[in-house]
Each structure stands twice: as structure tokens, then as C-alpha cells.
Image: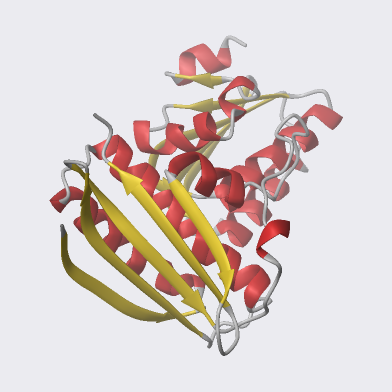
Amino acid sequence: MNCDTIKQVRRSSEGTIVEAQGDIDLRFQPEFQRALLEICSEKPARLIIHLGLVNYMDSSGVGTLVKIAHTVKAFSGKLALVAPSPKVRSIFEITTLDKYFNILPTEEEALAL
Amino acid sequence: MSEEENRICVRSDPGDLPLVRSLVERIAARAGFDEQDAGRLVLAVDEAIANVIKHGYEGRGDQPVEVSARRIEEDGTPGIALEIRDFGKQVPPEVICGRDLQDVRPGGLGVHIIRTVMDRVEYAAAEGGGMRLKMVKLKST
């Protein structure tokens, strides 16, 4: 997958883990969204988005994650966000979306959902 | 007390946003903001410029956006005063408001973020066209 904001995608019978990276902002959000929607088309039982390597996220990035949450819900899958830095987590708190998403510290906990 | 003003003019291109984020981050650090508050300040400024790009200039990437920032002190509390000036579409300031967060959907979060993070936010139609956004953030005590 040729996408600056996705370092790696790991697929297993338990689900798909996407390692996001870099700045997910107005510039890179369109490609981030396209890539995630493509992964959603595979309808993984669990979609885990690892945010540990994301330096910065703005409201367009959060908007993409909301769109992905709706998409995953539509095929009865599960979505979790893993390991955001305090800076990235902050935007979820300001927008109260930290209560909407499953935000977990590790992939293992996300896979146990 | 007010100190030196930092002013840059960027294009209304999302690729220029990291420049502004970097400037605001440096000034916030010099004003004594901790990492978390500095990050929130950077986010609010970034959202304000993103709104200029999306709404003021309707996605055109070659238009000017002026950003100025200066350290201030009010009643002994340090802070930052920021101003963002564009030359795009004018809208009545009273229509610029956040939306209901209970409605979980993509988009429309920028103004909520700006108003949550900043202590004072003032939109005005600028003389000669475009909008002027003045914001103040004081350091938490």
C-alpha cells in the first residue's frame, strides 16, 4: 500500500492491524481515508489502528476515524485505536470522542475485544 | 507587557500548515506552556487555518494567510496572542459556532476545538475583505 500515513498493515484471522504514522492533517487525511476505506472493504472482524507513530492529528484525521467507525459498525466489525501519544489523545478528549472510541494501550488488549 | 511579534505569511495550502505549527510550538515553549497546553494551542491554530483554507478560500491553495503571534502577560500570567488574517470569503462572525458533539459524524469540529482551547476568540470581517481572527491563550496557573 503506497501511503505516507500507513507504515504497515498486518492481517491475521483475529483481525487487521494498521500501523499509522506521521502527521494526519488536512494534507494527508485524504490518502489516509482512502487507504482505511480500502482495508474496510475486506470487512475484517477487528480493525485495530495503531497510532503510536502518529506525531500529529487534526480534526480531519479524527473525522476520518469517525467515518471508519461508522463503516466498521455497518458490517458488524470491531474498531479499536491503540497507543496514541498524549498529544494525539488530546484531540479525542477536546472533542469528547475519547468516550466514543475504544482507545486502548496495547494491541493485545484490542485483539481481546 | 508585550514582546516581539512573530509574523509569517503562508499560502492557503495544507502543505504549509507544518510551518505554522512549528512557529506556534516554538513561541508556546518560550512563553512557558507545558507540552500538553502547547500541543492544544498548536491544534487550535492549525484548525483555524484549515477552516480558512476550506471555507474562506474554498480549497484554493495559492491564497495568502497571515499569521502573527506574540507573547503577552495579563495580570502576571504569561500567554500568547495570535491573529490570523485571510482575504477570502466574509461571513458574519455570529454564524461561526461549534456544532452539537452528541451528533457523532465527520467534520465541523474545528470551531469547537478553537473555542475550547483558547481563552478568548474573536472573529471579525476585515476591512478590505476576508476575515480576521484574534485569539488569546493564557498559561494555566
The residue most toward the front is B75
- Between A72 and A85, the one lying in front of the other is A85
- Between A36 and B138, the one lying in front of the other is B138
Seen in the image, is B134 located left or right of residue A1?
left
Seen in the image, is A108 located left or right of residue B110?
left
Can you say whether A52 is above or below B26 in the image?
A: above
Seen in the image, is B94 located left or right of residue B62?
right
- Place of residue B126 in the rendered image (x, y in percent of width and height, measured from the top left): 55, 79
Q: Tell me, what colour scheme is on the image? A: secondary structure
Please tell me which residue is depicted at 61% across the width and 20% down the height of the picture: A99
Quadrant showing the N terminus of chain B:
bottom left
- Between B29 and A107, the one lying in front of the other is B29
Can you say whether B26 is above or below B36 in the image?
A: below
Please tell me which residue is depicted at 45% across the width and 42% down the height of the picture: B117
- Place of residue A60 in the rendered image (x, y in percent of width and height, measured from the top left): 60, 52
The residue most toward the right is A74
Q: Quadrant of residue B60?
A: bottom right
Seen in the image, is B88 located left or right of residue A50?
right
Q: Quadrant of residue A13?
A: top right
- Place of residue B15 in the rendered image (x, y in percent of width and height, measured from the top left): 45, 72
- Place of residue B109 in the rendered image (x, y in percent of width and height, measured from the top left): 63, 46
